[in-house]
Image (cartoon, rainbow, N blue to C red):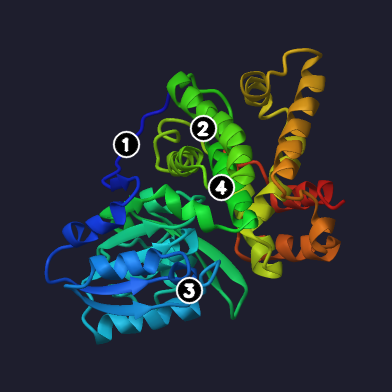
Amino acid sequence: MRNFEFYNPVRVCFGKGEIAKLSKLIPKGANILLTYGGGSIKKNGVYDQVTAALKDFKVIEFSGIEANPHYETLMKGVALCKEHKIDFLLAVGGGSVLDGTKFIAAAALWEGSDPWEILSRRSEVHVEKALPIGTVLTLPATGSEMNGNSVVTRWETHDKLAFDSEHVMSVFSVLDPEVVFSLPQIQIANGIVDAFIHVMEQYLTFPVNAPIQDRFAESILITLIQEGHKVLADRTDYDTAANFMWAATMALNGLIGAGVPQDWATHTIGHELTAFHGIDHGQTLCIVLPGIMKLKRENKKEKILQYGERVWKIIEGTDDERIDATIQKTVEFFESVGIKTKLADYGVGSETIQKIVDRFEKRGVKAIGERGDITPRDVARILELQLK
């Protein structure tokens, strides 16, 4: 196992009725910017619960944060923070709202010339301070409620970039599984595969003798497989919704990634498919991961075989046969929850592949992946394997 530093200060309030605790969780006298998306929280009762808990606070509302939150929209939130002297942000929504709110929190106190640098120059500049954030999660998927990661899209240039900072980790996160009851099937399906591939990015690399992390990761994968199908069949089963929600949080709160190599090539490539075509984040990941498993089957051989044996019970055949079967079982799982895995399924052709390669080369990206061996040319090969 590698050296690591694990830090997670997020207070999690999990279960029915926990939204009512907001009045005690937020500092008294806080000027709050309440952020949310397209208004679904006003249909499912979450908005009423939140506003009831905030009745004694000064609250400015900022709605309209998109799926794949737009930089242009978020900068309006930054302006509101400055205009109203906001000192606390409360994000109510799924991963996009939470990610967007993290950017607002950092950009509101950014002392550089352009807040976009937080994303475009993430390897050179770092967020040193941010407004405090609380979250009320309405869609299990990204783990954003318990990590310092954020992904933002600049619509003007079709760039989708990420940053991370411990300064934008939530002070608290409220997780009430009952929010799952009113979610559309596609959002649940995207959440299942998003969480699943978060685990794979930290697990499907190469062995470093970290059995605790491996077993934690495998337990989350198995839980998502079992509970994912159950929640799709009956999203009003509270226990199933709770298991799904907690699995998605545990998939990316830093625990299973401590002391192990991490990949993230699937996300890096998938972000470009969203940026160019607006494909749902979870869908892009299901396109890319099988291609990476095929191309890097030798580099990831030991962990693919372990994953196949422990998660899918694949123990018969040659190594190559077992790897083929493991990749196929992974694809079948994605498609069983309703997510297609080929570019052609989304009307995307080979011309997009060259655009993505050109963009990586323009940014100076020489290689990605846990070994730093996936070049822009390899990215093209991965996507070509997933054309149709």
Which numbered tag is attached to residue 5?
1
Q: Quadrant for residue 313, please give it.
A: top right
User: Who's the residue at 53% across and 63% down the image?
Assistant: 161
Which amino acid type is shown beneath numbered disc 3? Gly
- Residue for badge 2: 220
Q: Nearer the viewer, residue 183 or 5?
A: 183
Amino acid tagged 4: Arg
Q: Which amino acid does label 1 sit on?
A: Glu
Residue 262 appears left or right of 111: right
Q: Name the residue under label 3.
A: 39
| Lower position in the chain sequence, tag 3 or tag 2 | 3
Q: Using the numbered discs, state the Cα–Cα distance from disc 3 to disc 2 in whole angstroms.
A: 31 Å
Q: Which residue lies furthest to the right in this view?
A: 388
As displayed, is residue 323 above or below residue 109?
A: above
Specify which label sits upstream in the sequence, 2 or 4: 2
Q: Which of marks 1 and 2 is nearer the N terminus?
A: 1
Q: Is residue 186 left or right of residue 63?
A: right
Q: Which of marks 2 and 4 is in front?
A: 4
Q: Badge 1 local density, few (<14 within 10 Å), some, or many (20+)?
A: few
Rendered image quadrant of residue 354: bottom right
N-terminal of the two: label 1 or label 3? 1
Residue shown at 51% from the left, 27% from the top: 219
C-alpha gap between disc 3 and disc 4: 20 Å
**Given contact means CB atoms under 8 Å apart, are the residues at marks 1 and 3 in contact?**
no
